Amino acid sequence: MSDPHFLLRSSADRFLEVVRAVEPGQLGAPTPCTEYDVRALVNHLLYWGPFLEAAARRRPAPAVEGAEREVDLTGGDWAGELERLVGSMADALVQPGAQEGVVTMHGSELPAETLTRMVLGEWVLHGWDLARATGQAFTVDDDLATALHGPTAELAERARAMKVFGPEVPVPASAPAFDRLLGLVGRDPGWGIPS
């Protein structure tokens, strides 16, 4: 992956710009991630963020009470908590040696570089979801989209079987790299754009 430090910092900053601009009245808006409205997507990010943070810091997974769908973490200053989580993950993943060896995520070992790509994918794809759902612009440069596309393609069929990705959306090979990445994970790059 080309310069993971730059990709992590820039992706975190862009994701948090979108988070800060979400208005309370937009929490019920639909998102391109079809099973989530904005509130449920924020809840998803807050629920899984501590697991990603623990893996990034090579610490035991946090204790949780209930499954994602059984808890609502969007009360109070949810944007501030999400900002803290994202900042902590970015800090952990740019430390010397952070991209080496293996980490443990939800009871499974995986290469540290894979965790970094998972985190980037969360910020980039769900950042786009939130931006589209709330009428914000969101751009991803080709370098980051290309860095994510190969590893995502390797996991795509398994992710689809686990219902993590939706059915692939056909996107022309000539389309921008980010549009192709969106199609790969089951997003329509044109979602929310008036026709």
Image (cartoon, grey):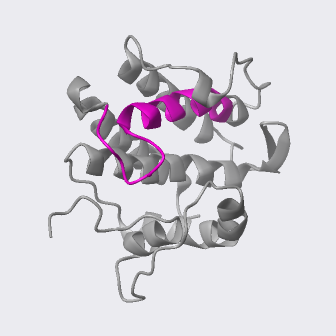
> The C terminus lies in which quarter of the figure?
bottom left
On the image, the x and y values in percent for residue 174 come to 36, 89
Residue stretch in magenta? 28-53
Tell me what residue is drawn at x 44 percent, y 75 percent. Answer: 180
- Residue farthest to the left? 194
- Residue farthest to the top? 76
Task: Please say whether residue 100 is one of the residues in the magenta stretch.
Answer: no
Is 146 left or right of 175, judged from the image as shown? Answer: right
Task: Please say whether residue 37 is one of the residues in the magenta stretch.
Answer: yes
Tell me what residue is drawn at x 58 percent, y 41 percent. Answer: 94
Tell me what residue is drawn at x 71 percent, y 62 percent. Answer: 161
Is 74 left or right of 14, judged from the image as shown? Answer: right
Camera-side residue: 181 or 66?
66
Is 36 left or right of 157, judged from the image as shown? Answer: left
Camera-side residue: 82 or 191?
191
Camera-side residue: 131 or 105?
131
> The N terminus lies in which quarter of the figure?
bottom right
On the image, the x and y values in percent for residue 96 come to 66, 41
On the image, the x and y values in percent for residue 135 come to 19, 47
Is 133 left or right of 187, judged from the image as shown? Answer: left
